Amino acid sequence: MELAIKIIYVFLVVYFINGVQSIDQHKMKMGSTLSTSKIIDKLNLQPNPEGGFFTETFRDTTINLTASQLPPRFKVDRPISTAIYFFLPSGNVSNLHRIPSAETWHFYMGEPITILEINDKDGSVKFTCMGQDIGASQWLQYTVPPDVWFGAFPTKDYDILVDNRVVKRAPRKAEKHFSLVGTTVAPAFEPDDFVLAKRSQLVSRFPTLESLISIVTSSD
């Protein structure tokens, strides 16, 4: 009986190890076959005016809100919510912009992505790293509040120093290094909401942030 138990134990250990290896090999195979161009094609992503790529996946038209039902910062009527995929390959950024709604980000796959927020009133800065490693304080979900300048960049593309100066790391292949997230906006996003930051204006107001602002804005 004792020998039989040992045989069963050894069998279960070998079975478990082989199972884990098979899962790891499957993950490695999946990771190696996915590329920026394949994801863009598969999800039908289009260039985003702020940078990166996107596609709208949901627009809830079952409830529509008029501008008069909303705070004054909302200028046009809109549905109650919208959702998109947002894809950011290495070497790209989401330039600073703002909208009147809260925007909730959801991390799906790929490398970590950092959301940068700049408070328009006092120039205070906030970084939020999104990714799968929650043990390293990465976020799976994060909400950007309304009317805040915000953008995003691949976390591994830059080093941010304690004084908010930026050091760009060596270029990496965009085909292999990317982040895929989703965002949900409520009340719904409308194109009239979108305000893209102008580098010269922000730098003139917050000169100590010039290095940081320059990576997430285009030249005027």
Image (cartoon, rainbow, N blue to C red):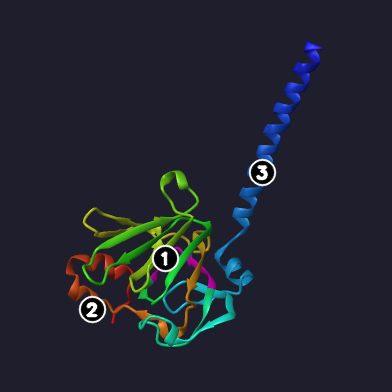
For residue 185, the mark is none
Residue 53, percent from left and from top: 50, 73
Is the residue 164 above or below the residue 200 in the image? Answer: above
Task: Give the residues drawn in magenta, as a range.
Answer: 83-94
Quadrant location of residue 33?
bottom right
Quadrant location of residue 42?
bottom right
Three-letter code for the amino acid on which mark 1 is drawn: Gly
Residue 213, percent from left and from top: 27, 69
Looking at the image, is mark 1 or mark 2 earlier in the sequence?
A: 1
Report helix, strand or loop for mark 2.
helix
Question: Label 1 vs label 3: CA separation?
Answer: 31 Å
Report helix, strand or loop for mark 3.
helix
Q: Which residue is mark 2?
A: 200
Q: Residues within 10 Å of mark 3 (few under 14, many from 20)?
A: few
Q: Which residue is mark 3?
A: 23
Quadrant location of residue 8?
top right
Q: Which residue is mark 1?
A: 91
Three-letter code for the amino acid on which mark 2 is drawn: Ser
